[in-house]
Amino acid sequence: MEFNFKLLHKNGLARRGVMQTPHGSIQTPVFMPVGTQGTVKGITPEQLHALNTQIILGNTYHLALRPGDDLVAELGGLHQFNGWDKPILTDSGGFQVFSLAEVRKINDDGARFRSHIDGKLLELTPERAVQIQENLGSDIAMVLDECPPADAPLEKMQDAVRRTILWAKRCRDAHVRKDQVLFAIVQGGINLGVREQCARHLVDLDFPGYALGGFSVGESPELMHAALPDCASFLPENKPRYLMGVGRPQDLLEGVAAGIDMFDCVMPTRNGRNGHAFTHEGQLKLKNAQHRRDPRPVMSDCDCYCCKNFSRAYLHHLFHANEMLGPTLLSIHNIRYYLALMEQAGLAIENGTFGEYRASCLARWSSGI
């Protein structure tokens, strides 16, 4: 099956579409749980299926270090290796170029790191990033990019954009796998002029999809929300648009309102491991004493395994007893919450009521609990 994206509905700037990939179709807008090291932490593929997960992520940098992309290829690719039979998107390692700034050197050739595991020198070039992702066998691969911090001076931001465009060309030239598509990444911070310049060059290269990188790296949510509609407008309407690494439920709805189709973030599982549950009224902190005798589920209208079977009191107990089931159950709930948020947004777009849906969600979250 070849990759294909079809735009089905629009409601304002919000979009409803469908992507076809070699491992199945994806309804958008979509949230993608993050499986950095080949697993969504604490969750089995069977549980992800039960949550109606459409696609998950894997991380190029981490999987190249351990267990090694050659080993994953030898064992049949990432789908075979981790037992997930639906689509997978792999990032390029570009975010590690940003997050490991103190232990890397970067130039036009690529980035050189010291492994966070054993200190071994790792060189990540555009060609190597593509090779790793082809070995992993993901459905969607990402170009290697440079992600500058939000407060980078204009000259440094422009240099990162220049390098991102250069690397995107090299990634495209190196990419040969026919059952995998390569998405480009637009950088430029919240400077709309630089963003537009980067997008224009990348759109000329005619990638199958485009991502907005370099958000949630230090700028305020308000500045990000204000920039998103223009940033999305710089991208082709007939191709998927992906906002990388963002974020809170309200950020997802603002992204959908701006015309974004795809989202990922570690928050549902990371917060779940820390005892925090996402709900319609904001976050619940299940470790707090107020939940010790509470017989209610996390959310009465949630259809996940956690909410259908367990009380807040039980979850409170699990976290205080340091039982691993607590983080697993809350991660299940949080992932389902994010997925349902996007499912309901899609239905609202079809019905022409996305504005009302978004306003209702934002009002409930702002009221707290």
Image (spheres, rainbow, N blue to C red):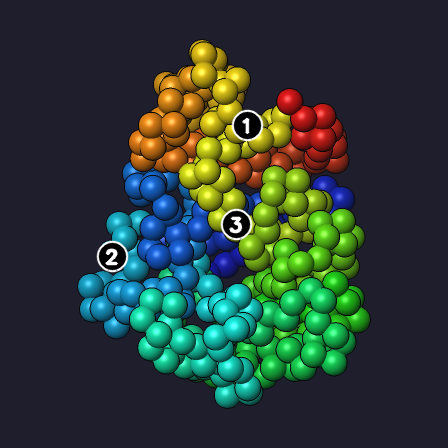
Q: Which residue lies furthest to the left in this view?
A: 75
Q: Distance between the residues labelled 1 and 3?
A: 19 Å
Across and down, in percent, residue 55 comes to 43, 49
Task: State which mark lies toward you, 1 or 3.
Answer: 1
Task: State which mark lies toward you, 3 or 2.
Answer: 3
Q: Residue at label 3? A: 265
Q: Is the residue under label 2 in contact with that under label 3 (CB below 8 Å)?
A: no
Quick check: can you spot residue 92? no
Marks 3 and 2, the one that precedes in the sequence: 2
Check residue 66 in the rendering and tell me which mark sits there, or answer none.
none
- Residue 148 falls left or right of residue 64: right
Disc 3 secondary structure class: strand
Q: Which residue is drawn at 62% across and 36% down?
A: 345
Q: How far apart are marks 2 and 1 (CA)?
A: 35 Å
Marks 1 and 3, the one that precedes in the sequence: 3
Q: Nearer the viewer, residue 266 or 356?
A: 266
Q: Which of 122 and 129 is in front in this view?
A: 122
Q: How far apart are marks 3 and 2 (CA)?
A: 22 Å
Disc 1 secondary structure class: strand
Q: Residue at label 2? A: 81
Disc 2 secondary structure class: helix
Q: How crowded is mark 1: few (under 14 residues within 10 Å), some or many (20 or more)?
A: some
- Residue 290 falls left or right of residue 241: left
Across and down, in percent, residue 146 comes to 58, 74
Up/down of 76 relative to 229, above or below: below
Q: Residue at label 1? A: 284
Q: Is the residue under label 1 in contact with that under label 2 (CB below 8 Å)?
A: no
Q: Which residue is drawn at 69% across and 79% down?
A: 156
Marks 2 and 1, the one that precedes in the sequence: 2
- Residue 15 falls left or right of residue 144: right
Residue type pointed to by label 2 = Phe
The part of the image, by quadrant, that contains residue 155 is bottom right
